Amino acid sequence: TFLQLDVYEQEAPEECPFEPTADETALCNIAYSSNANDLSLVDWNCVSETKPVNRPIWTGVTCEYGKITEIDISSMGFVGAQPLPASLGNMTALPRLDFHDSHFTGPLALQWGMLTNSVHFDLSDTLATGVIPSEFGSLSQVTNLNLSGNKLIGTIPDSFQRLSHTLTLALNDNELTSSLPESLGKLDHLKELYLDNNFISGDVGSYFCVFNNIDTFMVASNNSFLILVSTRKVISRTI
């Protein structure tokens, strides 16, 4: 008598086995926003806007236990033909987002302020335009917020006083116009603040005194009064 065993071939685990829900839709919307000649996300096999096929290997996407923990397409040569989608804000559990040196058009979507679990949020050198949405003040867990090297205009939102965990805030190399925002003085954990190369005005000396723990404060090439402080790194000059 022989014992017959039925052996079934187990499917290999997917590279990123998250459910095809809002997260996958948001990723595909990023791919759809790219320029027709852009090949940086060529393996994001989103051929249908309603139903992605063949479950792509998502270059730059990191998953743990079926959840997306990072989107990093920095310096991959991504070139967008339209603004990055507002649907990115639906990925509310996403801890890390890095689009540094990825070029897209248009403003920052206010819905991205819904990424309340994000700790690393880098949209530097993306050619983003428009104002900084006040909704970004809801990024209460972010420790590194980098919006530098863009074409952002307007003022720094007062809502940024709610960025209670932020250690580094980089808004340099934009076209921001305002006085030095008093609201940032409420960020007790802030270590590095970069406001240089904007059109921000004010008395840096008195402004600097509102910070308790800051180590690096960059305000060069603004309409700010000159101050030299030897104990902490302050770089400022009047233009």
Image (tube, helix red, strand yellow):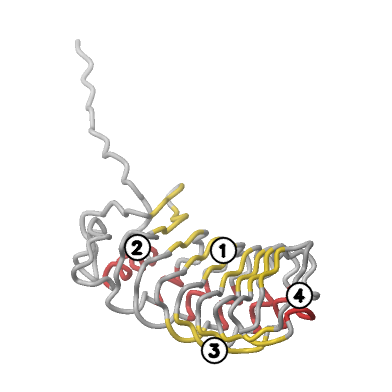
Q: Nearer the viewer, residue 225 or 73?
A: 225
Image quarter (top left, top right, bottom left or bottom right) of the C terminus: bottom right
**Residue at mark 4:** 208
Q: CA distance from mark 1 to mark 2?
A: 18 Å
Frontmost of labels 1 and 2 is: 1
Amino acid type for the residue under numbered disc 4? Phe
Which is more toward the observer, 203 or 130? Answer: 203
User: Are there few (<14), some (14-19), or many (20+) residues within 10 Å of tag 1?
Assistant: some
In the rendered image, residue 230, in percent from the top left (x then y), is placed at 78, 64
Label 2, label 4: how far apart the Cα atoms are = 44 Å
**Residue at 42 percent of width and 78 percent of height:** 128
Q: Which is more foreground, mark 3 or mark 1?
A: 3
Residue at label 3? Answer: 154
Which residue has dot 2 on it? 24
- Residue 117 is labelled as 1
Sequence-earlier tag: 4 or 1: 1
Q: Residue at x 73, y 65 (%)?
A: 214
What's the distance in space between the residues labelled 4 and 3, CA to CA? 22 Å
Nearest to N terminus: mark 3 or mark 2: 2
User: Could you tell me the amino acid type at mark 2?
Assistant: Glu
Q: Position of residue 35 (x, y in %)?
A: 24, 72
Q: Nearer the viewer, residue 23 or 163?
A: 163
Q: Nearer the viewer, mark 3 or mark 2?
A: 3
